[in-house]
Structures are given as C-alpha cells and as structure tokens.
Amino acid sequence: MKRNVLGILLSTAMIATALAGCGSKATGSTSAAPAVTEAKTSEGTQAPAATEAASNGDMTVYLVAKGFQSQYWQAVYKGAQNAAKGLGVRLEFQGPDSESDIAQQVQMVNNAVQMQPNAIGLAALDVSALNDSIKEAQDANIPIIGFDSGVPNAPAGSVVANAATDNYKAGEVAAENTYPLVKDIISKATGSVRIGVLNQDATSESIISRGLGFINKITELIEADGKSVCVTGNEKFVSDAKADKGDSADVILDVAVPAKVEASLMTTDAQTILNKDDTICIFASNQKTGEGLITGDENLGRLGKEVIGVAFDSGTMIKDAVKDGRLAGAVTQAPVEIGYQTVELAVKAAKGEAVTDVDTGCKWYTVDNMDNEEIIQNLYD
C-alpha cells in the first residue's frame, strides 16, 4: 500500500513538472512575428495601427504619432519596432490620417489610456486638446514619453522624458549652413532681398522651434555683417522672432503658414514667395513644406537658379531635388533613432527607472555627402 501511494505521488509530481515546463515555454517566447491590425476611429473610419507581439513580462508600450502614412512616421515606426523586438515588449503604434486630424488623435490617446499600457509615447498635434487625456493617463500612473515634437505645456509631471531632435538647434543648423550660400548675394545687393520661411503650421512645438531657430540664427548672422533684417508674415512667428517687425530692411524674412495642413496650400505658399522678384532663398522647415516647395517650382523653374532652396527632413522628392541641384541642401533628423529611443525610455519609465530627455540629433546633407554612412542611415524614401 505504501508503495502504491508513493508511486501515485511521484507520478503526480512528474506530470505537474511537465505541465509547468510547457507553460513557461509558451509565455516566455519573444519570437512572435509582427501583426498589423487596424483600429476604429471615433468617426468609424479605419486608421492605421501596428501591433508588435512580444511576451517578456507582458509589457505594452503604446505610441501615438502625429501621423502614420508619411515616410517620416514610417521611419519612426521602424525604430520603435526594432526597440520592441530587442527589449521583448508589445508595441502598439498609431497615428491619425493626417497631421490636421486633432480630434482623431485625441480619440487615439483616449483609446491608449483605456488599454492601460505600461507606458505611452506621444507626439502631440495640439496639447491643449489632449490635456484631459493626458491627465487621465497621469491619474492612472501611466508614464508618458514625448517624441518628435513632444508634449509641450502638458500637465506638470505627466511627461517624464522626451526623445526628440532639439528643433531650435536644428533650425540653427539650417541657418548656419544656409548663410554662406546667400552671404555674397546679400552683401552685393543694391536693394532689399527676401528669404522665405515655409512652415506647415504655427501650433506644433517642432515646427515653431525649428522655424524660430532658423529665423533668429540667420538674423544674427546677417546683422553681424552690418545688414538690417525684418520679419513679416505669420503672426505667431513674427511676434516670437528676435528680428525687427515689418517689411522694410536689407533682408526681409517672409514667413508663410497655410490655413490648414494641406499639401496644396503649402504649394501655394511656396509659389507666392517664389514669384516675388526679390526672393533669393527659401527654407522649408519639414518634409511636407519641402515637397510643397519642390512642387510649387515645377512650372517656375527658379530653384537652383535664381532662388536657393533649403529643406528639412528627407523623402524621395527632397533627396532627388538635392541630387539634381534644385535644393542646395537639407537638414535631416534621425527618425529611426527617435522611434528606438522612445520605446527604450518608455520601458525604463514603466520599470520605475529614472529617465531624462534624449536629443536624437540632426545632420546637414548635400549632394556631396548624402551617401556618407553617417548621413544615409537617416535618409528615408
């Protein structure tokens, strides 16, 4: 009888051990293939969403970008995917149909908070519209990592760190590399000359900082050579710029912002400035305005001839224009690095580790260096 009881106990223990081994093998796997899904928006339309499956601790990081379809955001997504795979976490990545769909992004952030992820990454289109959602995340103890333009003026303590280009410095980099191209033209001019500054909006921190970085630095460089500068155009940029206001000076900085974030309106802004006889240079502060500048010049043919074009970001159109000389150069961010660092910071914050802002950097590229290893990794199609 004792032998039978002992045998039963041993058999039971062996079965339990085997079952436990099977269970740990199933939950410990981190090699699941990515699954792409679609998420319903508040209007019932389909918005792109991407889910990266992983099971290391069942940690989920939810990123909400400013968009999804553009090549820039796809590059950010790629970096986020790389980090999620390496760190063994589940990734949700969403963005509205366009960068003017503020209500759609608000709904996506609300959905993210309801899912109770371990951390949220957010590139805000309009922080004021998102404040209630951000406060809900904060009340639920969900740390938020800002990325790209971040979440400026968010409720205190809600955003624990940012992974982004220092956009003001990036604008300065654009100005520092643009000024040598226009310096002689300005010094030899017998009348006033115009430099256009194209921005897709006057609400996003990244666009505002980048535009002001360019305006203030090129003003400083021009005035250091004894020429006067004034700024005209969009009210937000005019009021925040360090240059004198008005439309009379040796150099006029003409700042354009469309009424809505639409490609056709950016093209129109570019054409308006290109058509002014005193225009010598135009700086486009992101991919969309860069493409608008190139499209706007198609029937005018002034870029690379009478007008020096300078852009920001990458994409096929901008790269091709740099290669063929229509654009003198451009500044690129590191979108893959932005996505990677956002997820890495989110995981650390979710674990309760201390996190600080990360400047993901930028580079000036021209036809002469755009194939260099340190540049090409940041150029997306």
Image (cartoon, rainbow, N blue to C red):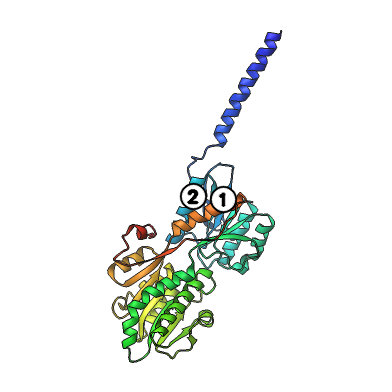
Task: Report the amino acid beneath label 2.
Answer: Ala
Mark number for residue 190? Answer: none
Q: If the image is split into quadrants, where does the N terminus sit?
A: top right
Query: Which sits earlier in the primary sequence, circle 1 or circle 2?
Result: 2
Going 50% across and 64% down the picture, which residue do you hit? Answer: 98
Task: Report the amino acid beneath label 1.
Answer: Val
Residue 140 coordinates in the image, percent (x, y): 68, 55
Residue 23 coordinates in the image, percent (x, y): 59, 31
Name the residue beneath numbered marker 1: 347
Mark number for residue 83? Answer: 2
Disc 1 from disc 2: Cα separation: 10 Å
Residue 39 coordinates in the image, percent (x, y): 55, 53
Above/below status of 267 relative to 77: below
Residue 164 coordinates in the image, percent (x, y): 50, 62
Q: Is residue 59 left or right of residue 276?
A: right
Report the residue that reaches farthest toward the top: 1
Going 55% across and 56% down the picture, which residue do you hit? Answer: 63
Q: Tell me, yes or no, if residue 199 can be seen here.
A: no
The quarter of the picture where residue 188 lies is: bottom left
